[in-house]
Every structure is written in C-alpha cells, then in structure tokens.
Image: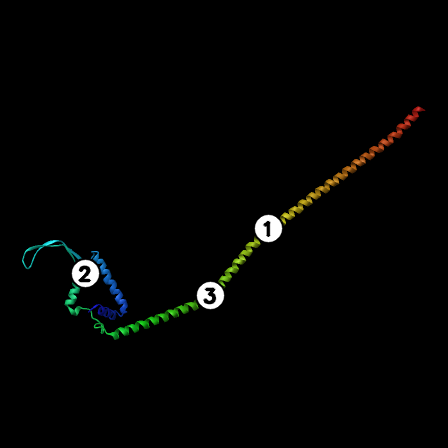
Amino acid sequence: MNRRELIRAVAAHTAQDAKHVESVLSGVTDVITAVVAKGEAVTIQGFAKFAKVERAARMGRNPRTGESIRIKASKRVRVSPMKAFKDTVMSPSQAPRLGSGVYPTSLELLAKQAAGRRAAASTAKATTGTKKAAGREAGARKAPAKRVAAKKAVKTVVKKAARGTARPATKQAAKRTVAAKRTVAAKRTVAAKRTVAAKRTVAAKRTVAAKRTVAAKRTTTKAPAKRTAKRTARR
C-alpha cells in the first residue's frame, strides 16, 4: 500500500473526503518529523514510537579481518512498534475489521459517500435557510411591537418633560403674582402715607392761617381802643 492507496482506504473507512484525509495525514507526518528532528520522541499509544537515537563512539571489529576498529559517533532514527500493535499484527483475529470496499478501495463506495455528504450539506443549508427565514419572520413580527413600545416610551418621556416644564413655569408664575401683589400693596401703602401727610399738611396750614387771622383781628380791635383813650385824655 502506497500513500495514495492509504489515503483512499482511510477516506472510505471514515466516510470522509479524500482531500481532507490527505491534509490530516500530511499534518501528522509533518508534526512527527519536526518533533523527532528536535530530539524529542513521539509515542502513539497502541501503534509505534518515533525517536532519534544518538550512539557514542565505540570500538568494534572488522568482520573480514577481525581487526579492532574505532566506530565514530552516529545518529539514527528508531521506529519501535508498540506491544499492542505487535500483538494485534501477530494475531489477525484481533485486528480491526474493515468494511466492504475499504481495501482494496472501491471507487463506487467513495462516490456513494461523496453523494451522501453532498445531500447532507444540502439538507443542512435548507434547514439553516428555514431557520433564518423563521427568524426573519419573527423579527418582522417583533419589529412593529418594538416600534409601538418605542413610541410609547417617547410619549411618556415627552409627557414627563412637559410636566417637569409646566411645574417650574407654574411656580414662576406664582412667584411673579406674589411679587406683583406685594408691589401693588407697597405702592398703595406709600400712596396712603402720602395722602395722610398731605392732609396733615393742609390741616396744619389751615390752623396756622386761622391763628394768624385771629391775631390780626385782635390787633385791629386794640388799635381803635388806644386811639379813643388818647382822645379822651387830651380833652
């Protein structure tokens, strides 16, 4: 089995697209190779262990001549199958069973699987489209309700704002009325005081005029009396 046959067999066994299987297989081999190259071992339980082994310099013998020779230090890759893999391979009855047409891979099986995947994708798209349509209808139904609620909220805010504006206006009008009343009362008080003062002034003037008139009359009466007294004395 080569790489291409392995990819087809895995695709048929897992009912996956061959391209997807190839991508995954390439990713697995790339990761294993990169990690082992750094000197770290990669162990896949139940399958195998991949590691890079370093061997130190040592002495050995030439198999032809039997002479002692020095073997240089070296590095090599070791792939060790795990015990479970060995046991399963040695006992075919314990090996996983592959479905019909997996290996050798049947092209008809791959075609059927591809058709099934396309049908499933179409069904999923139809279901998604139905859900989206239902969601749009629900959204369309909810939209008028949301608009009504928004309008109500706006009206409520406007009413509250009007109330809040009316109250200060009423208070200001009341304050202005009180101030106007106080101003009128003050003006009336001042006018009343002025009227009283004017009356008092007029009365005082009349009193003074009357006193002056009385004094003038007395003076006039005394003058003829004095004249009469003088005439009598002369006689």
Q: Residue at x 27, y 68 (%)?
A: 19
Type of amino acid at the residue the image marks with label 2: Lys
Q: Is residue 39 above or below residue 198?
A: below
Tell which of 3 and 127 is nearer to you: 3
| Disc on res. 143 | 3
Q: Secondary structure at mark 1?
A: helix
- The extreme top residue here reads 234
Tell which of 133 and 26 is nearer to you: 26
Q: Which residue is mark 1?
A: 172
Q: Residue at x 92, y 26 (%)?
A: 232
| Disc on res. 49 | 2
**Callout 2 environment at 10 Å: few (<14), some (14 to 19), or many (20+)?**
some
**Callout 3 environment at 10 Å: few (<14), some (14 to 19), or many (20+)?**
few
Q: Residue at x 33, y 70 (%)?
A: 121
Q: Is residue 124 above or below residue 40?
A: below
What colour scheme was applied to this rendering of the protein? Answer: rainbow
233 with respect to 206 (left or right): right
